[in-house]
Amino acid sequence: MAPRTHAPKPPEPHAADSHDLIRVHGARENNLKDVSIELPKRRLTVFTGVSGSGKSSLVFSTIAAESQRLINETYSSFVQGFMPTQARPEVDVLDGLTTAIIVDQQRMGSDPRSTVGTATDANAMLRILFSRLGKPYVGPPGAFAFNVPSVKASGAITVERGNKKAVRATYSRTGGMCTRCEGRGTVSDIDLTQLYDDSKSIAEGAFTIPGWKSDSWWTVRTYAESGFLDPDKPIAEYTKKEMRDFLHREPTKVKVEGVNLTFEGLIPKIQKSFLSKDREAMQPHIREFVDRAVTFTTCPECDGTRLSEGARSSKIKRISIADACAMEIRDLAEWVRGLDEPSVAPLLEALQQTLDSFVEIGLGYLALDRASGTLSGGEAQRVKMIRHLGSSLTDVTYVFDEPTIGLHPHDIQRMNELLLRLRDKGNTVLVVEHKPETIAIADHVVDLGPGAGAAGGTVCFEGALEDLRASDTVTGRHLDDRAAVKEQVREPTGALEIRGATAHNLREVDVDIPLGVLTVVTGVAGSGKSSLVHGSIPAGEGVVSVDQSPIRGSRRSNPATYTGLLDPIRKAFAKVNGVKPALFSANSEGACPTCNGAGVVFTDLGMMAGVSSPCEDCEGKRFQPAVLEYHLGGRDISEVLAMSVTEAEEFFGTGEARTPAAHKILERLVDVGLGYLSLGQPLTTLSGGERQRLKLATHMGDKGGVYVLDEPTTGLHLADVEQLLGLLDRLVDSGKSVIVVEHHQAVMAHADWIIDLGPGAGHDGGTIVFEGTPADLVAARSTLTGEHLAAYVGA
């Protein structure tokens, strides 16, 4: 008999293969309520749920934050001292983490010298290319950099070597910065009539600059008592010398009432105090003043290229670096492909790869000299993706925050393919997303909720997409929602005429935007929508623009301070109690002296994460005990700030606490769906969608007949979009005209009038391809938007 053979035993699984999950246990960051969850690695997981349900708290503030913190801890304490310190998230167990690469929605810095090219290293490679191949040779790579000024110096230096000896030395560095505009591409001209009223004297309060009160020490008093000017003489009667001193004098030390101060001409002072700052970071009233008082024109010397004459004179195949940066990136990629220079082959290959990534990700219509501050949130996020597309890294966790923002339905398919490619290389991809098209490609879906704020923070569902559809969660119920095309559209009451619009890529566009109705401006990303709406609609009286610029706010800022709600509340408290309003501000006289009104005491531990603990004196209430003795309607100020918006609306609507000014602001917050927020919640804890709606609520109080909204559905869940449509209808029905730049098909279907730009992006766009009602667009299907809208409504 043949010997009996046993089937070979399957090999024991390797211990290293058992770590296929990211385990989160007991997450309590922000509004999360002891969330425990297991996420599969090397899969695409989509997190969904209503705005404010805790998606970002789980993905960004817990998983990604801990991964980054652990990586930072691998560096020496010396290096950590230079890095941002991060506290350990509020979580019991986090297991199976891999290196996290975060691609978030943060807008790119809007420094005047930051461009798409400088933000992606494409400019750095181009500068090396021109310094090697450009004819005539003008210098090293720095000679082509608009951030590098030319420097010349000569003098004696002392060399301390044996006998000290003075040596004659000269030094020079060739930079590419245009000397006239200092690399900004624009020069500013100041309208003096906006700075002062020349019929008045300084003593009579001639200055009309925000913050320049007639008794302010550091400004007005310096001018009045410097000895150079007569404070009682009207500015219009100044002599030539007085006018020169008043407007242009170099900084000069003067003594005013025994105090040493610096007197400086008005124009250089304004340039230093206002124009050197980032416009986006200014307070609204300061920004309004700068827009009024300063006109920016293209620099006549460099023609807006930011570069010196030398840098512009050096060319490769009749193309200068200025020409290359002004080309659309897809054209530049073709030009680089045509360069055959073995001496710089590795450089050309790297540059080619970067430019091709732009085209692949749908940003081929941009130019490298485009200011990074002018990119939309979606464009900025995709620019950040560029460096990860060709990466050879695997087993990395990529974390995306709504990557489809700012994308036309036509472009979403492309983005989905990129996410799947990253996953297929063996990476874990975590995506916070609301769009059904992206939820559809998920291997695993996690739905948070059930509500927002305090009503959220739990996992309502996790599993496959089909199971989500069958589940009774808010997302499951709304996943297949489709808005129907409007049967009856409103009749316009007039028209806003735009003639010959040429901003950016627009080609002499003539269009009449109807007033008194809901108008949606749409088209593929880069077709010219924002250029038409923000660049061509006259920003005169009655136009209220709510764009995508982020809300900036520290942990001391909250919905009550941002919306101006705290002012009427403080006044109401002060009036009832017969004291001054400043007592009811945690940033002023009423602040707890121990924590300075922060509610927590921070202990800085150098290179380790700082520790914050609730203030023992005020117990986190932020106010002095004496202030909490004062009541309004039976509540103290800390109890009022702890209320939700809905609760506060009721409280300030009736009884002793009735405050119409506060009630009006609270009504607007409820209108935009923020009733669940607490008045004193720090702005730093709000999600992107919540901040966008907070901004919308604030602008709803502006006196204007035309509202221009830039993608108001950003960060909104499918269920919230329905509420937004109701809000837009209420605005139009109250007599306003609403113009919305939007890609969301539900908003398009709900519009009274659609203006579609295209047909493509960049130089393939910039024309109107359709004007009419949504029903006509669906029937014609003549444009990409028409095809997608028809598919959406099932026509």
Image (cartoon, rainbow, N blue to C red):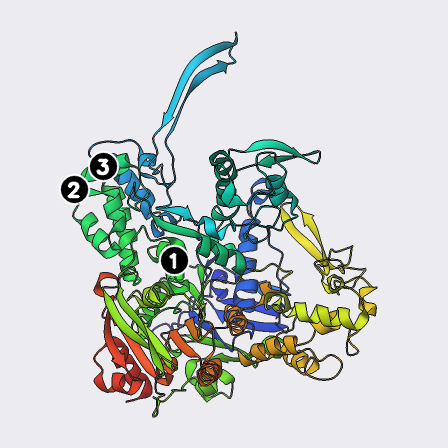
Quarter of the image holding residue 649? bottom right
**Label 2 amino acid?**
Arg
Question: What number is the disc on residue 318?
Answer: 2
Q: Position of residue 444 (x, y in %)?
A: 45, 75
Q: Secondary structure at mark 3?
A: helix
Query: In the image, which disc is placed on residue 313?
Result: 3
Q: Which mark is residue 374?
A: 1
Q: Is residue 768 visible?
A: yes
Q: Secondary structure at mark 1?
A: helix
- Nearer to us of marks 3 and 2 is 3
- The percent position of residue 80, horizontal first and vertical second, equals 58, 45
In the displayed structure image, the side of residue 772 where residue 86 appears, left or right: right
- Foreground residue, 612 or 530? 530
Sequence-wise first label, 2 or 1: 2
- Residue 610 shown left or right of residue 265 in the figure: right
* Three-letter amino acid code at the position of disc 1: Thr
State whether residue 227 is above or below residue 483: above
| Label 1 to label 3: alpha-carbon separation | 28 Å
- Residue at 31 percent across and 62 percent down: it is 361
Q: Earlier in the sequence, mark 3 or mark 2?
A: 3
Q: Residue 480 lies in what quarter of the image? A: bottom left
Left or right: 392, with 776 as reference point: right
483 in relation to 593, above or below? below
- Percent x, y of residue 37: 56, 73
